[in-house]
Every structure is written in C-alpha cells, then in structure tokens.
C-alpha cells in the first residue's frame, strides 16, 4: 500500500530506537535491502527506504534498550501526550526536528513503548503492508483489557476478539472499518515483557530468518499461522526484537 499521508489516529511508521544507527543500518541493508536517507537539520533521525520509498526510521538514543517502536500519526502531539498520561501512560522522551516531524515516545499502562508522530510536514512511511515494509503491528500483554482500554480511549479505537491457531485468543483494534493493529495475550511461560511487535513483510520467512542469523542476529521462533502466513522472530545485533512475515511456501 502506497501512502502519501496517514489519517490521524492511525499508525504511520515504526522507528528503531538504537544506540548505534550505523550498525543497525548496515544490518538491515544487508538483510532487507534498505538504504539510508539522512533527515536535514538533525543527526538524531534517519529514514530507511526500500526501493526508494520510506518504510521505517531510526532514532539515535543515548540509553535504554534498542527497540522497534511503532508511531501513531496525530494532529496535536502535546494534547495527545497529556491525554496519554492521564490514562496511566508515562513520557519517555520527545524530539522535534524542524521541517520534518515532532515525535514522542511513551510507555503505556503496562510499560510497552509506543510513539506519536506529528507531521511537520513529513507524514511517515510511504509504503506499508508490502514486502520490505511494515505488515502488521501488535502489542503483547498479560492483561488484554489494559491495552484495550488505554489505546481505545487514547486514539478512539474499537476492538473485537477472535480466535486463530496457534493462539487461543486474539484482539484486533479498529478505527471505523480500518484495522489498526492487534493485542496478543502472552502465555505465562513466555520470558518477555509487554511491548509492541513490528512485523515486516518478506518474500520467504524461513530464508530471511536464516539470513538474519548469518548476519549476526539470533532466532527467537518461527511458526505457521494458518490465517496469516509464516511468521518468525529474531534479535538483531543491537538487541532489538524484530518479527517477519511471509507466505506459506
């Protein structure tokens, strides 16, 4: 899907917060063919392009773990930040890049990080839901009702519950008739904290996961979701978890 703009209240991109943008750029270029485009006037932000179209961003951070953080487009970032905090969220940091965008990173009520993006005038990703770009976004939680309530009130999202293998339940966020993302309830034995998963589309999930490991990543899992495809996960060399999805071959 080619995107010239994004509706406020919808995800507009995902950003890798990293302490080493050069290492990340080298890894994802070798893995996915992404190229780097600097953002004029700031050294903190980089845009990642696939076949000439923006698909993601990198943000240079000084501390904290490397992590993929999806961003929602908003018209008034200050008001949305304030609303998020009244709902139990906490502010991590903000970044204003003149002529580009105003950004904020927050934690939701369970600690999962998410971002806000106010175009100034850059809208975010120009390609989504196609190979080389973000395919789906989901928040992992131990209590489905907490993110359902938090994001529902913050972005006016509705939600509905469904069931598909290999999970016992799954919740989908909607804004009108548009699916915005999902809520995945974690099993008690999972060694993970609540977080947002950025899932990227690839042509061959098994081959991409094998390549990620050859380039210095480490595999987390791979399995087939009958209604979604072949999905795998890995930890990149900076420690960020990244998920990929391809067709069942």
Image (spheres, helix red, strand yellow):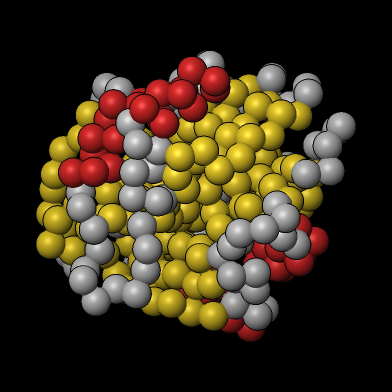
Residue, x 39% and y 76% (percent of image)? 221
Determine which quarter of the picture holds residue 168: bottom left
Residue, x 48% and y 32% (percent of image)? 72
Residue, x 45% and y 44% (percent of image)? 107
Residue 154 in the image: above or below residue 235: above
Pick the residue in front: 51 or 198: 198
Numbered label tally: 0
Please state if 125 lies on the left or on the right of 229 as rendered: right
Residue 209 in the image: above or below residue 54: below
Pick the residue in front: 23 or 64: 64
Image location (x, y in percent) of residue 114: 47, 43
Residue, x 36% and y 57% (percent of image)? 194
Residue 187 in the image: above or below residue 34: below
Looking at the figure, which quarter contains the C terminus? Answer: bottom left
Image location (x, y in percent) of residue 186: 25, 63
Image location (x, y in percent) of residue 42: 83, 37
Image location (x, y in percent) of residue 110: 33, 50
Please state if 96 lies on the left or on the right of 236 as rendered: right
Residue 33 visible in the current orientation? no
């Amino acid at each position: 899907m080619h995107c010239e703009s994004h509706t406020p209240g919808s995800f507009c991109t995902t950003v890798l917060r990293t302490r080493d943008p050069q290492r990340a750029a080298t890894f994802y270029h070798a893995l996915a063919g992404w190229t780097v485009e600097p953002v004029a006037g700031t050294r903190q932000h980089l845009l990642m392009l696939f076949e000439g179209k923006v698909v993601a961003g990198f943000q240079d951070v000084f501390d904290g773990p490397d992590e993929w953080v999806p961003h929602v487009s908003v018209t008034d970032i200050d008001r949305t930040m304030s609303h998020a905090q009244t709902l139990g969220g906490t502010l991590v940091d903000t970044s204003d890049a003149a002529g580009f965008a105003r950004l904020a990173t927050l934690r939701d009520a369970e600690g999962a990080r998410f971002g806000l993006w106010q175009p100034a005038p850059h809208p975010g990703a120009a390609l989504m839901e196609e190979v080389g770009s973000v395919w789906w976004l989901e928040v992992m939680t131990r209590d489905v009702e907490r993110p359902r309530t938090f994001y529902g009130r913050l972005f006016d999202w509705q939600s509905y519950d469904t069931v598909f293998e290999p999970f016992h339940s799954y919740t989908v966020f909607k804004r009108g008739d548009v699916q915005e993302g999902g809520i995945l309830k974690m099993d008690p034995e999972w060694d993970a904290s609540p977080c947002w998963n950025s899932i990227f589309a690839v042509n061959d999930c098994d081959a991409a996961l094998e390549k990620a490991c050859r380039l210095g990543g480490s595999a987390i899992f791979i399995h087939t979701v009958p209604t979604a495809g072949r999905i795998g996960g890995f930890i990149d060399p900076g420690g960020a978890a990244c998920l990929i999805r391809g067709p069942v071959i």
